[in-house]
Each structure stands twice: as C-alpha cells, then as structure tokens.
Image: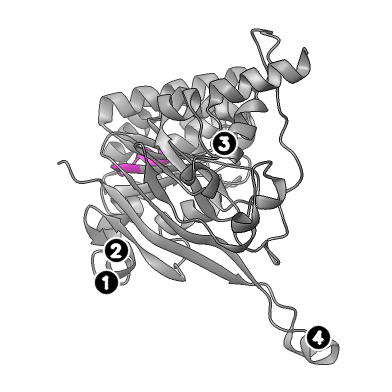
C-alpha cells in the first residue's frame, strides 16, 4: 500500500488550434499548436490530497481531464494503481476503472441536467454501471448519498433549478460518490460559490475523505482553499510544474519566484505591514511561449541562462523545483527577501 494510487509521468497534451485549411492556404499561415500540458510528472498517495494551483490558462483543468480519460494524452502516461489508464480504458476493464475514479466539475450550474430530477442525476452512475437494478434499493441508495452530503431524502424529487449553487455542488459530489470511487478529481469545485458556502462544501469533502479514505486531486487558483484541503501542492505555470512540495514547506518556505509572487498576492489579514510584491506582468501567449524558462519575462532573478535554457524539475532539499536561480543559489531565502523588501519600503 506504499505505492502511490496515481502516478503521472511526463504527461503532455497538445491542441491543434489552426485556422481552417483554406484560410491557411489563402493567408499563407502555418498550423498552430498550444502545448496545454508540457511534461508534467507527479504522484498522489492513497488517502491524500494533491492540489494544483496557478493562474488561469496554466493547464490545470487539462491535467484533470487527462487523468480521468476525458482527453487522450499526446505523450506520457497516467498510471492508476500501477496500470496505464489509456490501455485500460481501451480494453475490457474500462467500466471497472471508471467506477474507481470520478470527477467533480467546476460549474454546478452547467454540470447538472436541468431536465432531470435529483433522483435521476444521482442514480445515473448506479444504473449505468449496473450496480443496482431494483427501484426500491435505488431510491434508498440515492437517499443515503444525499444524506452523506447534507441534503434531505425529499430533495431527490426536485430539479436542479430549485437549489442554490452550494446545494447543486453537493448534488454533484453525491453523484461522484455513487460508484464508491477511490479517486476524485475536483476541478475548482468551489470557485463558483460564495465564501461561506465554499467552507461548507470543503468541510463535507474533508469529512468524506476521512470516513471513506478518498484520494483527491484538487484543482484551484485560491491559495486559501488549497491551504485548507491539501497535503501536497504543485504550482503550474504555462503547462509545466515549477514547484512541488508538501503544504507546510510550500507556504512557509516557497522557493520558486512564481510561487513567492502568488503567495505575496494573498491579502494580509493580520495587517503586519510587511512589504509585498504583487504578481507582475501577464501570462505569455501560449501560442508563442518565451524561450528558455517560460517565467523569465516576469522574473526579477532571470539571467541569460534563464532566457536560453529550459529548467528541469529537480529535487533540491526535498522540494521538486524547476528554477535555475534556485539551482545556482542565486535566490535569497524568504526571510532575507522580506527583510530587504521592508528595508526598501522603510529606509
């Protein structure tokens, strides 16, 4: 049981975003490709939560869809319990694998069929996989699933439009739990919800993980949420992992300049007066990414090597990080950097 439940090796996904053939011929334009995911590797231990964070467009949701088989990878492999999911999904074991992994989507207003009752929505995985045939047993199981996410059995006769956003997301969670999966991919499951409702949904997910031993891949751009739910955190930038560490290490001692910028963008609730460096610049155009390290146009520590050579994801002092400045020891510690900032702010 020491082996990770999910292991991702050099995963890549490229999308062809070229104009139609005739337009390209007339305008003499080449084909265009977006490298949405570019050589990502990580693993998720059983019963643990790995969170992926980063700005919009960095490839988080594409990774989520690759892991559950909604997209086929351009390169690399995804291993689930030691088996390649691409090969499994193409063979006779596809149904069994899909029962073991499920996904919670970002928008609860779009992921539920408005013409179906809650009973039909939650019961669909059970009937689709042939887990329950009897109508009475099916109704009882749907009631149990709704109760597990804090909803009443009477809610099964209602339609999605009769619920709030938080309640709809609970229905989505109940549907995902119907097949008793081991692995849940959560693609920003709380981003469309109010803050107070976010807390309720996250607490439900934490309780379910504790009771059922679930393994989560949690996609988010909200670092406060990530700090609450995760065991490990991976930071993505323009399709690549730039830092991967356990939660305590990443939040107390961030190494990569991009990770530091993300953490500095969090509002200072304690009003400590510490100098803060907001996230500078914009994410580059993925159709024409920068050479070398893709973060170098926004990085205050970039040099000629950063502009020419793409950094590999190396393990440095127990943290996986892709940064020439950290590798060469050019990046000051967090404490020193904050002291320098404070000195500049208050000379």
Which type of secondary structure does the marked residue at label 4 adopt? Answer: helix
- Whether residues under marks 4 and 1 lie with C-beta atoms below 8 angstroms apart, the answer is no
**Rendered residue at 60%/17% (across/down):** 196
Taking depth in this image into account, of 316 and 14 the one nearest to the observer is 316
| Furthest-left residue in this view | 1
- Measured in 3D between alpha carbons, the distance from the residue under mark 4 to the one under mark 2, in whole angstroms, is 40 Å
Quadrant for the C terminus, please. Answer: top right
Residue 44 horizontal/vertical position (percent)? 32, 43
Taking depth in this image into account, of 63 and 38 the one nearest to the observer is 38
- Measured in 3D between alpha carbons, the distance from the residue under mark 1 to the one under mark 2, in whole angstroms, is 6 Å
Q: Report the mark closest to the observer, 3 or 4.
A: 3
Q: Report the mark closest to the observer, 1 or 3.
A: 3
The label shown at residue 94 is: 2
Residue 154 horizontal/vertical position (percent)? 46, 25
- Measured in 3D between alpha carbons, the distance from the residue under mark 2 to the one under mark 3, in whole angstroms, is 38 Å
Q: Quadrant of residue 278?
A: top right
Q: Which residues are magenta?
A: 174-183
Q: Residues within 10 Å of mark 3 (few under 14, many from 20)?
A: many
Quadrant for the N terminus, please. Answer: top left
**Rendered residue at 66%/22% (across/down):** 340
**Rendered residue at 28%/34% (across/down):** 47
- Can the viewer see residue 119 in this picture? no
- Can the viewer see residue 300 in this picture? yes
Q: Which residue is mark 3?
A: 259
The label shown at residue 337 is: none
- Whether residues under marks 4 and 2 lie with C-beta atoms below 8 angstroms apart, the answer is no
Q: Earlier in the sequence, mark 3 or mark 4?
A: 4
């Amino acid at each position: 049981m020491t082996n990770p439940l999910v292991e991702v090796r050099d995963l890549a996904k490229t999308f062809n975003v070229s104009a139609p053939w005739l337009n390209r011929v007339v305008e003499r334009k080449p084909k265009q490709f977006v490298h949405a995911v570019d050589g990502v590797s990580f693993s998720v231990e059983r019963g643990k939560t790995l969170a992926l964070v980063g700005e919009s467009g960095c490839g988080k949701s594409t990774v989520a869809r690759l892991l559950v088989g909604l997209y086929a990878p351009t390169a690399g492999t995804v291993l689930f319990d030691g088996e390649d999911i691409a090969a499994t999904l193409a063979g006779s074991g596809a149904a069994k694998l899909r029962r073991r992994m499920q996904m919670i989507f970002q928008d609860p207003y779009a992921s539920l069929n408005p013409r179906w009752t809650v009973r039909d929505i939650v019961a669909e995985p059970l009937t689709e996989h042939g887990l329950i045939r009897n109508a009475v047993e099916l109704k009882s199981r749907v009631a149990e699933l709704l109760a597990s996410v804090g909803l009443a059995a009477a809610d099964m006769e209602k339609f999605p439009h009769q619920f709030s956003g938080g309640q709809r997301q609970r229905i989505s969670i109940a549907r995902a739990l119907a097949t008793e999966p081991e692995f849940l991919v959560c693609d920003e499951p709380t981003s469309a919800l109010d803050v107070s409702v976010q807390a309720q949904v996250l607490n439900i997910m934490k309780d379910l993980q504790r009771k059922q031993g679930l393994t989560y891949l949690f996609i988010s751009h909200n670092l406060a949420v990530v700090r609450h739910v995760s065991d490990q955190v991976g930071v993505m930038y323009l399709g690549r992992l730039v830092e991967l560490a356990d939660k305590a290490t990443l939040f107390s001692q961030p190494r990569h300049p991009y990770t530091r910028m993300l953490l500095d963008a969090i509002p200072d609730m304690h009003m400590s007066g510490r100098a803060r460096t907001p996230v500078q610049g914009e994410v580059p155009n993925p159709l024409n990414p920068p050479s070398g390290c893709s973060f170098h146009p926004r990085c205050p520590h970039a040099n000629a090597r950063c502009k020419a050579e793409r950094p590999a994801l190396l393990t440095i002092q127990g943290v996986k990080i892709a940064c020439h400045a950290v590798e060469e020891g050019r990046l000051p510690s967090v404490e020193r950097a904050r002291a320098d900032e404070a000195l500049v702010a208050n000379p």
